[in-house]
Image (tube, helix red, strand yellow):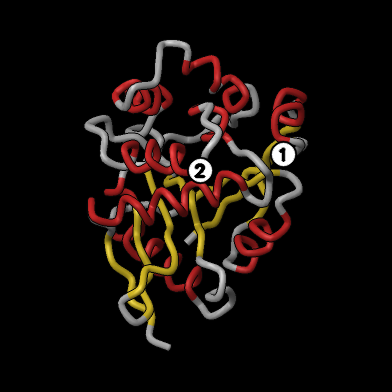
Amino acid sequence: MSIKIRKATVGDAPFLAQMILQSSRAGKKEGIFDLIFNQKSDKEVLKNLEALTQTNAKNQCHFNNFLVAEVDGKSVGTLCSYEPRIATKQTFVDALKEIGCGDDVSKSLEVIYECEFDLNTRTLMFDFMEELDGFIDVGILKALMQKSLLTARLKGYRIAQSIVEIGSLEALMYYKKLGFKEVATKECELYREKFGRAGLILLAIEF
């Protein structure tokens, strides 16, 4: 099986939206984007996520931050990498407002901000590491990570971080398999109340 890794383009927006939603739910019934968009149908949530990948505000979900894995011309996986100093909290809010979210969107984000870590803005963040069912354990995620770390090294980065939910055992296992180690854990009652998970785990890798 030949795996091709390439930079995402605007044409990948529907696939990126699918992977972002899959990642944010992480086995839960609802994730942060269900809360933000307050929509009942997956179709509406996906439509908003497609728009979010294409905003003028360069938020972390912007397509420019993604790599896409292909097998036989079919998109099968994604990995997002972004710089916290560029994709800030305010940039995310600006992007959400750009696609039609109201001024009260910040209230929906409180559940994330209450459980956030004090990140080093000179550290690269990884997110939305996902693959389609049927392509698990064939090397998709490893290929995406290798390419991302190579690019990060060329940009002068030596440490990358990612955040997963407490209890998201599959995601945690994947990251540890790729060489990440747990750095910090934060439990949050509001997060537990909204999503049924105790909080978040900060992971890091040196390369």
Q: Is residue 159 visible?
A: no
| For residue 137, side relative to residue 49 (left or right) | right
Residue 86 in the image: above or below residue 53: above
> Type of residue at label 1?
Thr
State whether residue 40 is above or below residue 159.
Answer: above
Numbered tag placed on residue 157 in the rendering = none
Name which of mark 1 and mark 2 comes first in the sequence: 2
Rendered residue at 45%/52% (across/down) = 18
Cβ atoms at labels 1 and 2 below 8 Å apart: no
Q: Position of residue 186 (x, y in %)?
A: 71, 33
Callout 2: SS:
helix
**Residue 25 makes an appearance in the image:** yes
Find residue 152 and report its horizontal and vertical position in percent.
35, 56
- Give the label, 1 or 2, closer to the camera: 2
Inter-mark Cα distance, 1 to 2: 31 Å
The residue at 60%/29% (across/down) is 116
Q: Which residue is under mark 2?
A: 42
**Crowding near pointer 1: few (<14 within 10 Å), some, many (20+)?**
some
- Residue 68, quarter of the rendered image: bottom left
State left or right for residue 87 relative to residue 163.
Answer: left
- The image shows residue 55 at horizontal and vertical percentages of 26, 34
Q: Is residue 58 left or right of residue 96?
A: left
Q: For this rendering, which residue is in front, 133 or 120? A: 133
- Badge 2 local density, few (<14 within 10 Å), some, or many (20+)? few
Instruction: Say which element carries label 1.
Output: strand
Name the amino acid type tagged 2. Asp
Q: Position of residue 151 (x, y in %)?
A: 32, 61
Pick whichever, 136 or 38, lies toward us. 38
Could you say which disc has been placed on residue 185 in the image? 1
Q: Which residue occupies the extreme top position in the image?
A: 103
